[in-house]
Image: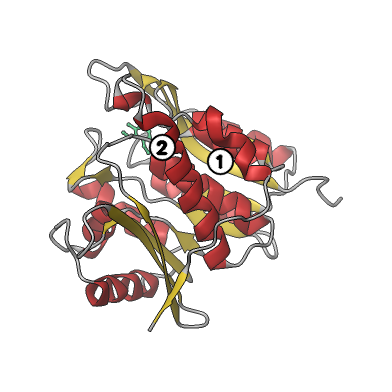
Amino acid sequence: MRNHLQRVAAIHDLSGFGRASLTVVIPILSSMGIQVCPLPTAVLSSHSAFPGFNGRDLTNELPKMIEHWKELNIQFDAIYSGYLGAVGQIDMVKNFIDEFAAPDQLVIVDPVLGDNGKLYSAFNETMVEKMKELVAKAEVITPNLTEAAFLLGESYRPKVSISELKEWCFRLAELGPKQVIITSVPEETMPNKTSVMAYNSVDLRYWRVTCDYLPANYPGTGDSFASVMVGALLQGDSLPIALDRAVHFISMGVRATFGHDHHPAEGILIEKVLPSLNAPVQISSYQLLD
Ligand code: PXL
């Protein structure tokens, strides 16, 4: 039977406090009219940027949950993975992609590994190596600059030229994905701007969307960005329009948050900007790169 709504299997952790992973994936995709079926990889009191967090890895639970979904014969229009609780989960997600494959399905992997040049506290080089295998099974990947550097074995540096970034996108596409999106790219010549770069290996086009940069570091923005990308692509947007929508959603969320004085680890106030996801595209600033 055809799904009544587009349906996404969302393989991420549930962090109770701080807006990251499932606490942003679900509201964003629900606001975009898409049904989310979470497969939680871990349950944490907060994301790992808060000191003293408590977490429970769900690696041993996943096979039983996946088995039940198979018995229910659930069909997914998209499979979307993010933060994985342990390296042993990578093979499970790879198998999930094989077992739940369907025609025209979107498989999007956000290879969550780290930020600002460092791996997140739960991860090491083994996770990086294994993540390459998962990336190879995706149609779309959304690493940030740090994750792109780790996946390519490059040293992280905050300033990477556009020609180097194009080469990084190309090399990431050689790992398997058709579309590569690198987020959190500082602009070389404009310190108050930040960009997202994308490459579509099907039509060989490179895209860039630039927005204002405010000096703050909010965990979970990568999860919000990738979730808007999933929603927009499922709604039939082109790659550059999906990029535009995701960049401007984050940009608005950062602006809605920046003037407040709470701890940045609480993340961006997505609740203030969720309704904008239902508006027609208003700002369009994508650029096609030579
Ligand atoms: O994608 C961000 C994220 C997700 N989940 C957990 C995290 C983080 C980033 O710190 O710690 C548990």
Kindly identify the amino acid type of the residue bearing the numbered disc 2.
Answer: Arg
Res. 251 image quadrant:
top left
Position of 102 compared to 254: left or right? right
| Ligand 1 located in image quadrant | top left
User: Residue 118 placed where, x, y %?
Assistant: 18, 44
Residue underneath mark 1? 10
Position of 12 compared to 290: left or right? right
Position of 224 compared to 219: left or right? right
Residue found at x 21% / y 55%: 191
Q: Is residue 88 above or below residue 283?
A: above
- Asked if residue 1 can be seen in this view, the reply is yes
Q: How is the image coloured?
A: secondary structure
Q: Is residue 216 above or below residue 209?
A: above
User: Residue 254 placed where, x, y %?
Assistant: 40, 37
Q: Is residue 202 above or below residue 248?
A: below
Q: Which is more toward the observer, 121 or 237?
A: 237
Residue found at x 22% / y 19%: 51
Residue found at x 31% / y 20%: 261
Residue furthest toward the right?
A: 1
User: Residue 179 placed where, x, y %?
Assistant: 47, 68
Gap in Å between the C-alphas at discs 2 and 1? 27 Å
Residue underneath mark 2? 255
Is the residue marked by circle 1 packed among few (<14), some (14-19), or many (20+) residues within 10 Å? Answer: many
Which dot, 2 or 1, sits closer to the camera?
Answer: 2
Q: Is residue 15 above or below residue 52?
A: below
Q: Quadrant of the C terminus?
A: bottom left
Total number of numbered labels? 2
Position of 231 compared to 246: left or right? right
Q: Secondary structure at mark 1?
A: strand
Q: Which is more toward the observer, 283 or 166?
A: 283
Q: Secondary structure at mark 2?
A: helix
Kindly identify the amino acid type of the residue bearing the numbered disc 1.
Answer: Ala
